């Protein structure tokens, strides 16, 4: 009674068996070897693809790897996906804040020009000052948020504030 590839794989035995993936002569066999890390090597000397050999035996490719490695790979994949999602969310938030900062700078510039115009023409009102103050507060809040997201940029902004102040 000849040994099958499935029996060698499932019983964790090293050996040779006839290839069932194609019709080979009796000399063309499949070698099954178990490695210390728990993986299984399957080699058809007739040139069949490993996936074809194991599929012909009713096995799956994942059965060539120990369960602990599969679970560990799945855990690493899940962690990698979570990290990528956090990084993408972080990048999106940073981009949004930079965009809002540019708009706040433009708003401050426009409000400042409007204040200069109002002062030159005797049209100063508290509302004009309030608009500029709100724009400065918005910019400060955005810079604070940016500092939380990117500590290195916080240092740069602090140096910039000191230079202006």
Image (cartoon, grey):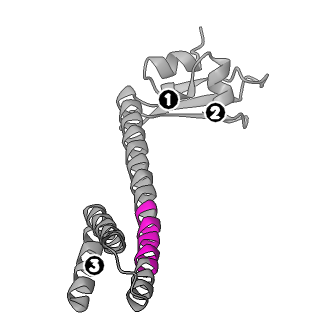
Gap between marks 1 and 2, in whole Å? 10 Å
Single out the mark in the foreground, 3 or 1: 3
Q: Earlier in the sequence, mark 3 or mark 1?
A: 1
x and y, in percent, of residue 38 in the image: 38, 33
Single out the mark in the foreground, 2 or 3: 3
As helix, strand or loop, the secondary structure at mark 3 comes to helix
Q: Is residue 124 above or below residue 3?
A: below
As helix, strand or loop, the secondary structure at mark 1 comes to helix
Taking the spot 52% from the left edge, 15% from the top edge, the residue there is 7
Label 1: how many residues lie within 10 Å, few (<14), some (14-19) or many (20+)?
some
Whether residue 99 sits left or right of residue 23 in the image: it is: left
Mark identifier at residue 124:
none
| Quadrant of the image containing the C terminus | bottom left
x and y, in percent, of residue 110 in the image: 46, 79
Is residue 108 a member of the stretch shown in magenta? Answer: yes
Quadrant of the image occupied by residue 146: bottom left
Taking the spot 43% from the left edge, 46% from the top edge, the residue there is 85
Residue that carries the numbered disc 2 in the rendered image: 50
Mark identifier at residue 64:
1
Q: Earlier in the sequence, mark 2 or mark 3?
A: 2
Query: Among all residues in the image, which is located at the extreme front?
Result: 122
Label 2: how many residues lie within 10 Å, few (<14), some (14-19) or many (20+)?
some
37 or 144, which lies in front?
A: 144
Is residue 56 a member of the stretch shown in magenta? Answer: no
- Magenta-tinted stretch: 96-110
Gap between marks 2 and 3, in whole Å? 58 Å
Q: Earlier in the sequence, mark 1 or mark 2?
A: 2
Residue that carries the numbered disc 3 in the rendered image: 157
105 or 135, which lies in front?
A: 135
x and y, in percent, of residue 134 in the image: 32, 67
Q: Are marks 2 and 3 in contact (CB under 8 Å)?
A: no
Quadrant of the image occupied by residue 11: top left
């Amino acid at each position: 009674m000849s040994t099958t590839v499935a029996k060698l794989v499932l019983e964790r035995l090293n050996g040779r068996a006839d290839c069932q993936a194609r019709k080979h002569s009796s000399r063309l066999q499949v070698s099954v070897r178990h490695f210390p890390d728990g993986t299984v090597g399957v080699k058809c000397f007739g040139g069949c693809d490993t996936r074809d050999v194991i599929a012909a035996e009713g096995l799956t490719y994942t059965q060539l790897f120990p369960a602990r490695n599969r679970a560990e790979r799945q855990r690493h994949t899940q962690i990698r996906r979570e990290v990528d999602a956090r990084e993408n969310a972080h990048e999106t938030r940073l981009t949004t804040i930079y965009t809002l900062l540019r708009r706040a700078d433009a708003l401050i510039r426009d409000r400042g020009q409007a204040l200069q115009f109002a002062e030159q023409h005797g049209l100063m009102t508290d509302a004009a000052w309030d608009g500029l103050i709100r724009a400065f507060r918005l910019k400060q809040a955005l810079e604070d948020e940016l500092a939380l997201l990117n500590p290195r940029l916080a240092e740069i902004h602090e140096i910039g504030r000191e230079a202006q102040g």
